[in-house]
Image (cartoon, rainbow, N blue to C red):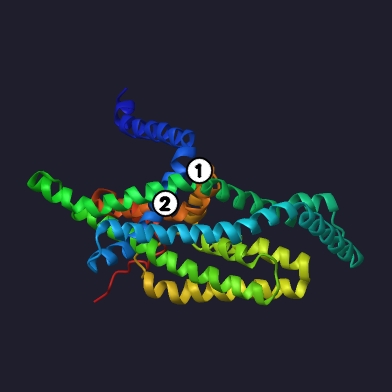
Amino acid sequence: MTDFRQHSPLLITAACLVVIIAGVQAAASLLVPLLLAMFIACICLPPLHWLVNKGLPATWAVLLVTLGLVLLGAFLSIFVGASIADFSQNIPTYQERLQGQTTQLLAWLSGLGINISNDMALDAFNPAAAMGFAGKLLAGFGNALANTFFIVLTVIFLMFEALSLPNKWAVIGEHAPSTDAISTFLKSVNQYLVIKTWISLATGAVVSIWLAVLSVDYPLLWGLLAFLFNYVPNIGSIIAAVPAVLLALVQLGADTALYTGLGYIAVNIIMGNVIEPRFMGKGVGLSTLIVFVSLVFWGWLLGPVGMLLSVPLTMIVKLALEANPKTQWIAILLGPDIEPITDKIS
């Protein structure tokens, strides 16, 4: 009985987490548009505050930012939406060609004396499955954006609320709780999302231009995928590159596939190792294991959109843990590698 009482707080916490996770998964259809709206609203806050600081009324500032969102959404619907539909329709053809090329490769290896079972090889490594995965991922993201009116409306309300919240806090006065930790947390989240978004936009633009130069089909589509998966460090660039490289292999041959892969490697080395650390700093980051676990967890919990938002969501959790002195140790465990502490010998 004593042991149970000692561990009962831990058991209660674990039980609460299980109930919360089950509830989140059951409400995923409602939470996914809300999370997208909050994500978009955080990105829109800097230009919104800039317009307000320039003397523009809050209503007009929100309307201008919303107009920009609508124009961007129209662009994605017209150009990228058509590419998603066309690519999804051609996936069976691409998968058949990839399976044929895999069979030819196995036959060539067999001629060199390396005998590998065709069925066993396709079960262990089937490149055609990557094309199907990319199609499902893009379709899931498209389904989440299908409720565009609800997302845009929620973003508008969030922007109005963000502008009015300081006034409400001032009216509450001395009865309001301390805002230092909340302000630090919100500033860190907003800074992370804005910087990451600009770097992701640059990554997607360069990838689209490079693939267009190589004449690979759907360059805007692969640029969008590179933009989305740039939020997932370390492994996101690999996931985004695989379907584009395979398509280049099917469409234009091994040489173009090689150039495509080298382009992805160069872009992600420059963006991830040179530009991003310069603007992001070393204070924000996750370990490679946590990145992979968060990708699997949020993908299981919220579907394809959860995979795309896995690292931002985990970063928000990490920043919230850092804001509380009692949970800072968990944030350190979630973070990247740190230099070992060595005793100085005088």
Q: For this rendering, which residue is in front, 203 or 68? A: 68
Q: Position of residue 12 (x, y in %)?
A: 34, 30
Looking at numbered disc 1 in the image, what kind of residue is underneath it?
Leu
Q: Position of residue 143 (x, y in %)?
A: 56, 46
Element on which disc 1 rests: helix
Q: For this rendering, which residue is in front, 68 or 201? A: 68
Looking at numbered disc 2 in the image, what kind of residue is underneath it?
Leu
Q: Quadrant of the N terminus?
A: top left
Position of residue 72 relative to residue 254, above or below, is above
Q: Position of residue 223 (x, y in %)?
A: 58, 66
Q: Is residue 98 left or right of residue 203?
A: right
Going from N to C along the chain, the mark reached first, 1 or 2, is 1
Q: Residue placed farthest to the right in the image?
A: 111
Q: Residue placed farthest to the left in the image?
A: 174
Residue where numbered disc 1 is placed: 302
Question: Quick check: marks 1 and 2 in contact, CB under 8 Å?
Answer: no
Q: Position of residue 166 (x, y in %)?
A: 19, 53
Q: Residue placed farthest to the top in the image?
A: 1
Q: Is residue 216 left or right of residue 25?
A: right
